[in-house]
Image (cartoon, rainbow, N blue to C red):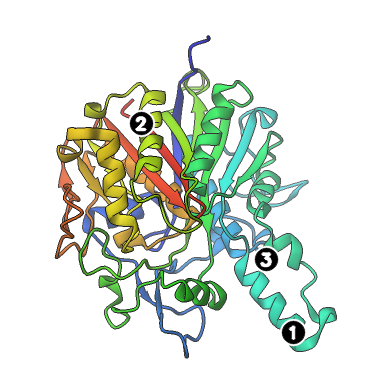
């Protein structure tokens, strides 16, 4: 069997509730800044849930042409903006400005377009597009529906548009595994490079579903926090005994993955090694993880094996950590199952305490948080951890950032349907 090709990270881009760049995101994590607030996207009259973690001050024309942005759903705008930042950091994009035959100001990848791929995780697609189309259909009839409803609402629209924007001719896939989508997309990107099909892959997750339909649907599932709508920054509290549900968020986290040989040949600055990935399924329940934690625990073990890591090699585990009654103690069991006694010696935290739960976007954010943690030697805190749940008895970095040398970090994501995705990163 041939030795696995090493895969590295050369660029990162973030659009998030706590900042619209990787640098802003990093600073917010260190500061323990909450991105949760009152919903501004729609009138919440009649809703029990009135809070969310919205992206603020987002103008897509900062990153892409206005004409292109107008033909995109919000989740695609997030992904395209984050991709621009990531490609710029990786130095894999043509200079900004000027016109081309393809359109005003449109930029192209400088890698071989046929050897460059895209894998984006997305859970729901253009929900605001779907919502508006249904409103027009029911109120005014089918002839009043927006003409671009279908191409804007479909989940693969982000990958397709990024291909068009940047002239990428390799595979462009969309991974849909609910809240594990972003992590699973990164894993699929890893495999594309290891297999030799691509030299470069733009990978990560994106989501924008802070709309009445999604808030109402999650509200009816009793999944969202309702107790702290008057103090929204305190609502997301993973591993805390007083948690009462997650806070819906939005945004995109994008990485540039490259084969080590390709990155070294062009003299790229390497941020970290993407060393391993694994995915499993619980085969248990459509919305709840298996109570034993073994499904997610097996994914962690397999990801460590894929990365050539022993449990004791890992200093930081970025938890799915949704702040729901069932997830947090079950994930604690997963971590103990995979790491054994070492689970009590390493740091574990949930940045969803700050970003909210951004569905497919979360896997992208959290992988980026791992790389930032490795590069800068810090453990992002779990804010609002004031009254620890006795069933959650690990070191969750409560409330304040901590510092230390991190040689390896692992990120886990769990999705409705029993999907478990785990990514492992090493210092390069």
Q: Residue at x 52, y 52 (%)?
A: 417
User: Residue 215, position in %: x, y?
Assistant: 49, 74
First along the sequence among labels 1 and 2: 1
Q: Residue at x 34, y 55 (%)?
A: 24
Q: Furthest residue to the right? A: 143
Q: Residue at x 30, y 35 (%)?
A: 338
Q: Nearer the viewer, mark 2 or mark 3?
A: 2
Q: CA distance from mark 1 to mark 3?
A: 24 Å
Q: Which mark is residue 301?
A: 2
377 or 370, nearer to the observer: 370
Q: Nearer the viewer, mark 1 or mark 2?
A: 2
Taking 171 as reference, is 4 above or below it?
above
Q: CA distance from mark 2 to mark 3?
A: 44 Å
Which residue corresponds to mark 3? 70
Would you call the spot at circle 3 few (<14 residues within 10 Å), some (14-19), or many (20 or more)? few
User: Residue 72, position in %: x, y?
Assistant: 66, 61
Q: Which mark is residue 22?
A: none
Q: Is residue 309 left or right of residue 176?
A: left
372 or 284, nearer to the observer: 284
Taking 187 as reference, is 330 above or below it?
below
Is residue 50 in sight in this rendering? yes
Is residue 85 in sight in this rendering? no
Q: Nearer the viewer, mark 1 or mark 3?
A: 1
- Quadrant where the C terminus is found in the figure: top left
User: Residue 14, position in %: x, y?
Assistant: 44, 52
Which residue corresponds to mark 1? 138
| Pointer 1 with pointer 3, Cβ within 8 A | no
Q: Residue at x 32, y 80 (%)?
A: 229
């Amino acid at each position: 069997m041939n030795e696995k090709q090493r895969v590295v990270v050369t660029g990162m881009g973030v659009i998030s509730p706590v900042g619209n760049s990787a640098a802003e995101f990093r600073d917010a994590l260190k500061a323990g800044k909450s991105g949760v607030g009152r919903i501004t996207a729609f009138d919440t009259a009649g809703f029990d849930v009135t809070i969310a973690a919205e992206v603020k001050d987002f103008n897509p024309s900062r990153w892409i042409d206005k004409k292109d942005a107008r033909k995109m759903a919000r989740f695609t705008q997030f992904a395209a903006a984050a991709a621009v930042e990531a490609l710029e950091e990786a130095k894999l994009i043509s200079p900004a400005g000027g016109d081309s035959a393809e359109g005003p100001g449109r930029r192209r990848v400088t890698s071989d377009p046929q050897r460059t791929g895209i894998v984006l995780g997305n859970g729901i697609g253009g929900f605001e597009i779907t919502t508006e189309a249904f409103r027009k259909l029911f109120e005014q009839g089918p002839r009043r529906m927006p003409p671009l409803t279908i191409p804007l609402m479909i989940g693969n629209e982000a990958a397709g548009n990024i291909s068009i924007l940047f002239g990428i001719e390799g595979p462009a896939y969309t991974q849909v595994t609910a809240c594990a989508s972003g992590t699973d997309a990164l894993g699929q990107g890893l495999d594309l490079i290891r297999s030799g099909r691509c030299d470069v892959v733009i990978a990560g997750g994106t989501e924008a579903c802070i709309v009445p339909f999604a808030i109402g649907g999650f509200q009816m599932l009793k999944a969202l926090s309702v107790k702290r709508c008057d103090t929204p920054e305190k609502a997301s509290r993973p591993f805390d005994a007083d948690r009462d549900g997650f806070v819906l968020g939005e945004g995109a986290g994008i990485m540039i993955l490259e084969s080590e040989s390709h990155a070294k040949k062009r003299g790229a600055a390497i941020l970290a090694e993407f060393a391993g990935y694994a995915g499993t399924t619980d085969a248990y329940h459509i919305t709840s993880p298996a109570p034993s934690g073994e499904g997610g625990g097996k994914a962690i073990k397999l990801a460590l094996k894929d990365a050539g890591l022993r449990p004791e090699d890992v200093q930081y585990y970025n938890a799915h950590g949704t702040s729901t009654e069932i997830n947090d103690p079950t994930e604690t069991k997963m971590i103990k199952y995979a790491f054994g006694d070492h689970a009590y010696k390493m740091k574990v935290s949930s940045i969803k305490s700050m970003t909210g739960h951004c569905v497919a976007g979360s896997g992208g954010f959290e992988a980026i948080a791992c790389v930032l943690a490795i590069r800068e030697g810090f453990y992002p805190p779990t804010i609002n951890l004031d009254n620890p749940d006795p069933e959650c008895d690990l070191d969750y970095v409560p409330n304040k950032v901590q510092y230390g040398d991190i040689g390896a970090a692992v990120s886990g994501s769990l999705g409705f349907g029993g999907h478990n995705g785990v990514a492992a990163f090493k210092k390069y």
